[in-house]
Image: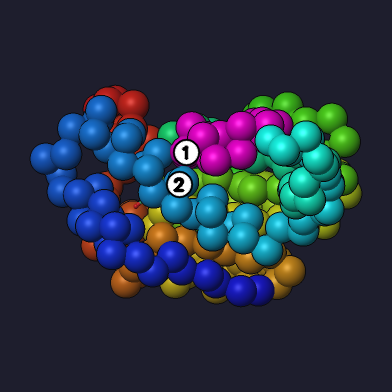
Amino acid sequence: MSVISVSHPLVKHKLGMLRNIETNSKDFRELITELTTFLTYEATKDWELEDATVPGWEGKPVYVQRMAGIDPSIVPIFRAGIGMQEGFMQVIPTAKISYIGYYRDAETLQPKLYYAKLAADISRRKIYVLDPMLATGGTTSAVCRLLKKEGCKNIRVLCILAAPEGLEKMAADHPDVDIMPAVVDSHLNDKGYIVPGLGDAGDRLFGTK
Ligand code: URA
């Protein structure tokens, strides 16, 4: 598994604004969108190109290159992953969107699937799982397991913050899946929140609580 962090001064600047608890929901959503565009450029930079020709301004064919293969699918994980959808779609507007939702079972504490609507031909697509917070990694690991059962072979996870605990779980469960966080934070607290973190990403995105 590779962990590929995006190192850019603007990313660091925007992360600082996200961590500020005085940043309101509107600005928080815009920052998540902007950071996701950076992650998307990084996550797609090894994409294969194919040769093509287009009619040029001189009336002659001009050699160009274009992205090869079938459109990718993003997989925003409910709920906070939806906050990253817009940023990805600004960069790759033809991506398909597959939603997946899990809740944590109160007794077993294991993730339980409650919603999945996947793009057609999902097994042939590059998959970009979106979840701003890779905390314990339990849900993200379950999502990757489900996608692999559907035949997906090319999966990347884009997140804004990752905890070392979540990265370790992903490395153990899915060594073939690359993780692309904007930053890796220090640790999880006893309630499973990332420290220093930014709080509950879903609540801050959607203005709940
Ligand atoms: N989910 C969040 O929204 N925040 C955390 O810190 C951990 C998980």
- The residue indicated by pointer 2 is 36
Q: Is residue 127 visible?
A: yes
Nearer-N-terminus badge (1/2): 2
Residue 89 lies in quadrant: top right
For label 1, the residue is 87
Q: Which residue is drawn at 64% across and 48% down?
A: 128
Residue flagged by tag 1: what amino acid is it?
Gly
Is 11 placed above or below 26 here? below
* The magenta stretch spans residue 97: yes
Label 2 SS: helix
User: What is the quadrant of the N terminus in the image?
Assistant: bottom right
CA separation in Å, label 1 and label 2: 5 Å
Name the residue located 47 percent from the left edge and 38 percent from the top edge.
87
Residue appearing at x 51%, y 46% in the figure: 131
Mark 1 element type: helix
Q: Position of residue 188 (x, y in %)?
A: 35, 64
Asked if residue 107 lies in the magenta stretch, the reply is no
Quadrant containing the C terminus is: top left
Residue sitting at x 55%, y 72%? 3
Q: What residue type is labelled 2?
A: Thr
The reply to whether dot 1 and dot 2 touch (C-beta < 8 Å) is yes
| Percent coordinates x, y for residue 49 in the rendering | 77, 55
When the figure is inspected, residue 104 is found, relative to residue 26, above or below; the finding is below
The reply, left or right, for residue 86 in relation to residue 30 is: right
Q: Where's residue 121, x and y in %?
A: 87, 36
Q: Number of marks in the image? A: 2
Magenta stretch? 84-99
Mark 1 surroundings: few (<14), some (14-19) or many (≥20) residues within 10 A: many
| Number of other residues with Cα within 10 Å of mark 2, as a class: few under 14, some 14 to 19, many 20 or more | many
Instruction: Decide which of 105, 186 is in the foreground and name it.
Output: 186
* Left or right: where 63 falls relative to 143: right
